Amino acid sequence: MTPRLASADDLPTSAISLAAAFEHYPWTRHVIPEENYHQRLHDLQLLYLEYAHMHGIVAVVGNGEGVIALLPPDAPEPDPGMIDEIVRLHGDRIDRLDHADLPTDPPTGAWRLETLGVLPNSQGSGIASALLSFALAEAARRGGASVELDTSDPRNVRLYERHGFQTITHTGVGGGPPVWKMRANFPHAPGKGCSPETTAAEALSAYLAATNTHDFDQVEKLLSSDAVYFFGDATCIGLTQVRDYFERTWAMIPDEHYWAEKIQWVTDADQAAVATYTYHWKGAIEGEMRSGAGRATNVFMRTEHGWLLTHEHLSSLPSGDLRQETDA
């Protein structure tokens, strides 16, 4: 169930999945009329997916069981026909839409996460987190500086926070459900590391996104020159050894996808920050899909270039904690 960029053939099935995922979502219930609600929701999701596929990023898992779509800041305005269709589908509730909810005005310099959904019977299996990591890495690869989003579900807030998003505002809109506006920043190429204003959580998110590019030059931007890694089968000291280990792993698992869950900050001080989390990976080894999980500790230090990772320690999960197909 490794995320991949969607093809045009994936969009109809993906729209069906999104309609099921958002069936009871507070915001869509607020802005779409009850009459023919499910069909209106499906048609809107398909419109947005087709637009994002043409101008941004759409990624899927499997046959569309999970879907994510992002738009770049320079996405063109939708054509008049699309706008007319959006207005028709929202009917007498069109006035409840905030301008930012139409794909016409992404924040200056920021990508916008338009939608992320997983079929109800597949939720809780890590698909949303995998899609988010994949899409953030792809946006970063395309030169993205940051991503913004809106959500009306507090459970989503926790998911996004694990990927480095921070809440900008938390408000109600026109008597509707609460809305959390959130933002995550990416590494600032071509300089070293993240912006000095970046938080440790954003640096961790950027690091995880960089690992999924399979381009060590992107990972290196987030690393201290004397970084020390404790892997389960090796100790690597310095960027040369770390690069060699990463690139050998990617060669063995060319489609590997890596993500983090249950992130906890042991300390988050002015000059040092330490995070622990459960890491997961999936990918094909010699044509056979494999996966694994383990525990990770990351140590970040604040420098003139922003937060840099100086130490990572990976270890196996305690016996019985999680089933693993492959020892991590």
Image: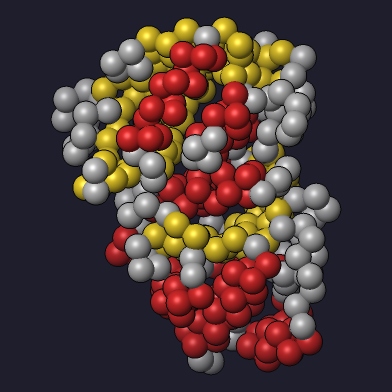
Residue 25 lies, with reference to residue 33, above or below; the image says above
Is 292 displayed left or right of 25 in the figure? left
Q: Is residue 104 above or below residue 268?
A: below
In the image, what residue occupies the spot 49% across and 60% down? 5
On the rendered image, what quadrant is the C terminus found in?
top left
User: Hey, which quadrant is residue 218 in on the image?
Assistant: top right
Residue 206: tell me if it is visible: yes
Q: Nearer the viewer, residue 76 or 184?
A: 76
Counting from the top left corner in percent of width and height, residue 327 is at 21, 29
Q: How is the image coloured?
A: secondary structure
Task: Decide if residue 227 is on the left or right side of residue 248.
Answer: right
What is the x, y in percent for residue 18? 47, 71
Residue 219 figure quarter: top right
Q: Is residue 201 something one can see in this rendering? A: no
Please state which of residues 279 and 265 is positioned toward the viewer in this rendering: 279
Q: Residue furthest right?
A: 108
Residue plotted at (33% across, 54% down): 1
Q: Is residue 245 left or right of residue 271?
A: left
Give the vertical position of 259 relative to 276 (above or below): below
Residue 98 figure quarter: bottom right
Q: Position of residue 26 (x, y in %)?
A: 55, 67
